[in-house]
């Protein structure tokens, strides 16, 4: 995620330097970041607040891209380090649905809310970025494009915002110099807005394959989600992510509008990829059709 966002953030103006904090300088992505203009700073242990603070010294804005089940603990360390290093704005790893409407019942989202609450306690301004579902990644998580299989909860007819991860950085780069967001706030953006059914049909057309679809009742899907989550919280990582997949597909079917960002989406003049453009590049290209 960080690498994808960094592509666009490299275009930011109003900053004297770009610093990418990574674990491994010799990694291929670190070398590519350096080629984009980023100065590479290595921190091998992101739980070490002193080391992270030293990496952040002199930084005006910190953009976080932590993920996984350690997101909360890593983000808390980075948040405190940014505050003590004198940063004036922190962009937490909140990329995704609008949690104000979506809610924070799922553990991932509960943790993200905790981060924002802690930032408020620390008096650290934050800018939350809502972008809907990642159009270049979400289909491999919620469906099985390689085997032409998919799942719909309800009729799949609720509108969902989709954004390519690399596009996020280009819009965020513009937002970081917006005086209205200098002290934090909310940035919503989207590359496209389609229903899940429309998205699957688009993917079928691009791949030239009819998908085998499983249909689930919204309440039955919720029961399955809760059963998987119980196993996940007991240590079954696969069950945890399975529950999260059902959560992302099921909440829109149950009336949750936190994934529809049309009302507040901004682009700052950046041309974002449509869902069809992204799917064509990601899937048709992979099969030699693009």
Image (tube, grey):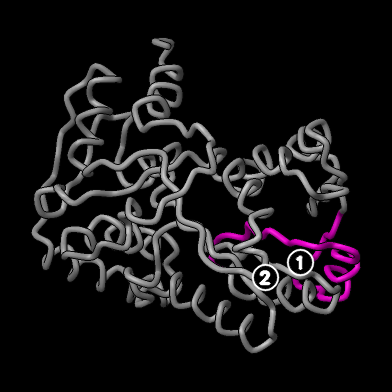
Image position of 172 (left or right of 186): right
Comparing 112 with 8, the one in front is 8
Image quarter of residue 82: bottom right
CA–CA distance in space, label 2 to label 1: 6 Å
Q: Position of residue 33 (x, y in %)?
A: 77, 38
Is 160 displayed left or right of 17 in the figure? left
| Residue at 41% in and 16% down | 287
**Where residue 74 is drawn, which disc sits there?**
2
- Left or right: where 58 falls relative to 283: right
Position above or below: 208 against 72: above
Q: Residue at x 83, y 60 (%)?
A: 44
Q: Position of residue 266 (x, y in %)?
A: 46, 48
Element at label 1: loop
> At numbered mark 2, what does the secondary structure look like: helix, strand or loop?
helix
In reply to whether residue 55 is colored magenta, the answer given is yes
Is the residue 148 above or below the residue 15 in the image? above
Q: Position of residue 254 (x, y in %)?
A: 16, 65
Asked whether 101 or 219 is in front, the reply is 101
Q: Is residue 117 magenta?
A: no
Disc 2, disc 1: CB below 8 Å?
yes
User: Which is nearer the eye, 112 or 175?
Assistant: 175
The quarter of the image holding the C terminus is: top left
The magenta segment is 42-70
Q: Residue at x 11, y 68 (%)?
A: 219
Q: Residue extending furthest front?
A: 179
What residue appears at the point 38 percent right and 72 percent down from the top-left corner?
100
Crowding at label 1, few (<14), some or many (≥20) Cα neighbours within 10 Å?
Answer: some
Sequence-wise, the earlier of marks 2 and 1 is 1
State the mark number for residue 46: 1
């Amino acid at each position: 995620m960080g690498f994808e966002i960094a592509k666009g953030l490299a275009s930011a103006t109003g900053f004297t330097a770009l610093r990418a904090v990574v674990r491994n300088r010799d990694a291929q992505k670190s070398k590519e970041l350096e080629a984009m203009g980023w100065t590479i700073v290595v921190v091998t242990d992101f739980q070490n607040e002193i080391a992270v603070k030293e990496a952040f010294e002199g930084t005006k804005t910190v953009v976080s891209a932590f993920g996984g089940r350690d997101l909360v603990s890593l983000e808390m360390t980075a948040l405190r380090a940014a505050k003590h290093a004198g940063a004036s704005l922190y962009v937490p790893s909140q990329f995704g649905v609008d949690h104000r409407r979506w809610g924070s019942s799922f553990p991932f989202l509960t943790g993200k809310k905790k981060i924002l609450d802690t930032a408020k306690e620390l008096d650290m301004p934050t800018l939350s970025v809502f972008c809907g579902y990642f159009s270049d990644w979400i289909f491999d998580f919620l469906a099985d494009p390689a085997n032409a299989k998919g799942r719909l909860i309800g009729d799949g007819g609720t509108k969902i915002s989709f954004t390519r991860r690399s596009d996020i950085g280009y819009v965020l780069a513009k937002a970081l110099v917006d005086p209205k967001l200098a002290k934090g706030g909310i940035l919503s953006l989207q590359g496209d807005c389609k229903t899940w059914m429309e998205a699957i049909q688009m993917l079928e057309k691009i791949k030239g394959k009819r998908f085998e679809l499983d249909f689930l009742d919204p309440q039955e899907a919720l029961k399955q989600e809760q059963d998987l989550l119980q196993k996940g919280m007991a240590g079954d990582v696969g069950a945890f992510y399975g529950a999260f997949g059902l959560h992302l597909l099921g909440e829109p079917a149950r009336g949750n509008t936190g994934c529809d960002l049309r009302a507040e989406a901004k682009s700052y003049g950046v041309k974002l990829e449509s869902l069809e453009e992204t799917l064509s590049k990601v899937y048709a290209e992979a099969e030699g059709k693009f």
